[in-house]
Image: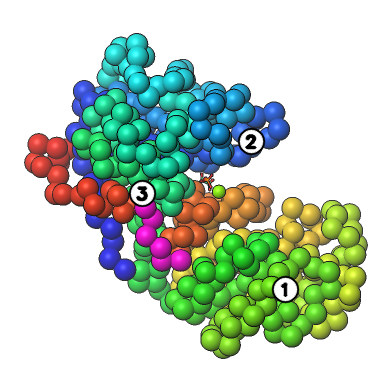
């Protein structure tokens, strides 16, 4: 895998320039709009701080959720995000509505100023990657900086078309760091390369399972995905979450890569999907018709620990059990701890995975935490991320005058 070549923010002279930063500030919120995890906001600070420190005027935008274009509802507003960014920056961050055509906020913007531009996915044409919208937005600034790794798999106006129409288009430090770390893990990985793909559905991750099975030495499956593989291997799963339609696909992977995809040999079952359901450990062969598999058992955990302990590189997306329920969290906890203890270069990504890592207190012992969910998976799959492709297409050696060193 050759490293993508694009202009980086650090190589752009932003002094006295207006810098438009497209971040991914699409953070989880509770029903009252309170931010439940601000990792993406914190990860987006370096681009903003660097631009301000070097004398730029910064406008930062992001999408939040999947709003209807043309109407900004309260629930879609970046107001809580602007407030949190303000707290983290120690200054007020003004939030600008209806910003595409500029206005007084724009004409008065000065070096050192920082404003947030409302949910860019509300703008008509954003999702369709509209050239007209991009051309309009490009008039607002001198430098376009895409720092939104989590949205790099979406060809939208602020992530894709803008890279073509901006005078200067560069990648921010978060986007660049993600690509560096993921490229390092998958480009020339230290072997054995172990991937763990858990989560509910095979259907959303089938192509990645295939692509990973080609690349890795061991592919550990977990959650509903493992159940589908258990079925494919001729096992019983009771009324556990699985996708019987995809058993054929799972079997094809098992047949094509013999020995690479270990199947759990024991499991933790319950009769109900509830935090207070009674957990029962049993061999995978003894699962009853009314059982729900909610975690992997101790024997499977021990096997997984042995695999992780000798790995050179580990890539992790998705839990192996219902870790939100204490009684069914042992598998995911053991996995998180084994990855933290291992000397392998480890990368983890995806909302549930980060939540598990945080819950088990190992966040500082994972080599790299990706802010991407879908983008992380598409990268692992070997797909070209449209936002990155657009930056690469724009890439020319930066003229001397633009270099800072
Ligand atoms: C994410 O949370 O996965 C990214 O911010 C992309 O959001 P989307 O799936 O709504 O495009
Ligand atoms: Mg998503």
Q: Which residues are magenta?
A: 381-387
Q: Secondary structure at mark 1?
A: helix
Crowdedness near tag 2: few (<14), some (14–19) or many (≥20) residues, C-alpha within 10 Å: some
Residue drawn 59% across the image and 25% down it: 73
Q: Secondary structure at mark 3?
A: helix
Query: Cα distance, mark 2 to mark 3?
Result: 26 Å
Residue drawn 26% across the image and 42% down it: 164
The chosen color scheme is rainbow
Looking at the figure, which quarter contains the N terminus? bottom left
Prevailing secondary structure of the magenta residues: loop
Q: Which residue is mark 2?
A: 29
Q: Nearer the viewer, residue 289 or 315?
A: 289
Query: Cα distance, mark 1 to mark 2?
Result: 33 Å
Asked if disc 1 and disc 2 are in contact, CB closer than 8 Å, the reply is no
Name the side, left or right, on which 14 lies relative to 37: left
Q: Which residue is mark 1?
A: 244
Residue 130 horizontal/vertical position (percent)? 37, 39
Residue 8 horizontal/vertical position (percent)? 26, 45
């Amino acid at each position: 895998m050759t490293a993508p070549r694009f202009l980086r923010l650090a190589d752009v002279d932003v002094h006295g320039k207006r810098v438009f930063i497209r971040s991914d500030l699409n953070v989880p919120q509770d029903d009252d709009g309170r931010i439940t995890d601000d990792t993406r906001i914190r990860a987006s600070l370096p681009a903003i701080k660097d631009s301000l420190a070097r004398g730029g005027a910064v406008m930062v935008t992001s999408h939040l959720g999947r709003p209807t274009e043309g109407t900004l509802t309260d629930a879609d507003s970046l107001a809580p995000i602007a407030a949190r960014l303000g707290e983290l920056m120690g200054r007020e961050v003004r939030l600008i509505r209806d910003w595409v055509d500029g206005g007084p906020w724009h004409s008065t913007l000065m070096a050192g100023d920082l404003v947030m531009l409302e949910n860019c996915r509300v703008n008509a044409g954003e999702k369709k990657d509209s050239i007209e919208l991009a051309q309009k937005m490009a008039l607002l600034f001198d430098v376009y900086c895409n720092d939104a790794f989590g949205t790099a798999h979406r060809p939208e106006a602020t992530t894709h078309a803008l890279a073509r129409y901006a005078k200067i288009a560069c990648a921010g430090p978060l986007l660049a760091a993600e690509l560096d770390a993921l490229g390092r893990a998958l480009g020339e990985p230290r072997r054995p390369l172990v991937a763990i793909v858990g989560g509910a559905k095979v259907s959303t991750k089938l192509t990645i399972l295939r692509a990973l099975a080609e690349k890795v030495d061991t592919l550990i499956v977990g959650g509903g995905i493992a159940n589908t593989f258990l079925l494919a291997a001729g096992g019983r799963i009771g009324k556990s979450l699985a996708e019987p339609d995809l058993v054929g696909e799972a079997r094809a992977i098992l047949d094509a890569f013999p020995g690479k995809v270990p199947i759990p040999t024991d499991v933790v079952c319950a009769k109900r999907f509830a935090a207070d359901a009674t957990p029962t450990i049993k061999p995978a062969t003894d699962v009853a018709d009314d059982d729900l598999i909610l975690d992997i058992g101790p024997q499977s955990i021990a096997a997984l620990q042995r695999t992780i302990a000798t790995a050179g590189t580990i890539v992790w997306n998705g839990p192996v059990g219902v870790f939100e329920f204490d009684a069914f969290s042992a598998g995911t906890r053991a996995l998180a701890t084994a990855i933290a203890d291992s000397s392998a270069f480890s990368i983890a990504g995806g909302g549930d995975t980060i939540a598990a890592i945080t819950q088990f207190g190992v966040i500082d012992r994972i080599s790299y935490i990706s802010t991407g969910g879908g983008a992380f998976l598409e990268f692992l799959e070997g797909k070209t991320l449209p936002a990155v492709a657009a930056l690469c297409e724009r890439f020319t050696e930066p003229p001397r005058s633009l270099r800072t060193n």
